[in-house]
Amino acid sequence: KLVALSDFSVLASLREGLPRSIVQSLAGGRPVVVSPFRGIGEVVKNHENGIITASRSAAEVARETVLLARNPKRLHYYQNGARQTSVDDWTFNNMFGQLDAAYLKSFDNAGVAKRFQQNHAGRRRALA
């Protein structure tokens, strides 16, 4: 509900995994203003569905936030970009599946991989 009430979202973190709030904003057609951190460019396409600031400073994030809030034409452009962004790759189930596959691939011992699969089969079914 909060995403629907907003014009855009802001995330000024210095370090993140995959921020769910960014995925939720884009899924709701809302662009984002984010500080640069590793991997964010996989989700946020700078000047298409949001803004990745030039630096990590709070002042830079604030400056870009104000500029976007004061420019309805630019905001509308980024909102269109956000609406066109597919977040299918970033769903919980897809991310869990990728992580699960990476762990299974990393097991050198077939017995370890088999035990892991048996122990987590119920969890995967519950998430499906």
Image (cartoon, helix red, strand yellow):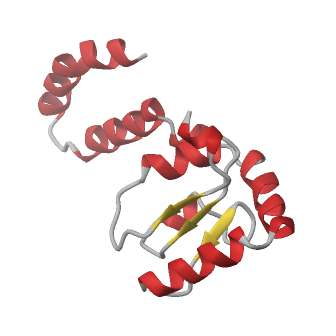
Residue 45 shows in this picture: yes
Q: Nearer the viewer, residue 70 or 123?
A: 70
Residue 87 shows in this picture: no
Which percent across, then down, holds residue 53?
Answer: 56, 80
Picture residue at 56% right of the left edge, 61% below the top: 42
Q: Nearer the viewer, residue 76 or 88?
A: 76
Which percent across, then down, holds residue 109?
Answer: 14, 38
Name the quadrant of the C terminus: top left
Q: Nearer the viewer, residue 1 or 104?
A: 1
Picture residue at 33% right of the left edge, 69% below the top: 15
- Numbered label tally: 0
Direction right: furthest residue: 73
90 shown above or below 123: below
114 shown above or below 87: above
Answer with the quarter of the image where residue 73 lies: bottom right
User: With 115 as the anchor, is 73 left or right in this view?
Assistant: right
Which percent across, then down, holds residue 2?
Answer: 54, 39
Name the quadrant of the N terminus: top right
User: With 118 as the anchor, is 41 left or right in this view?
Assistant: right
Picture residue at 60% right of the left edge, 73% below the top: 65
Which percent across, then down, holds residue 56?
Answer: 43, 83
Answer with the quarter of the image where residue 64 lies: bottom right
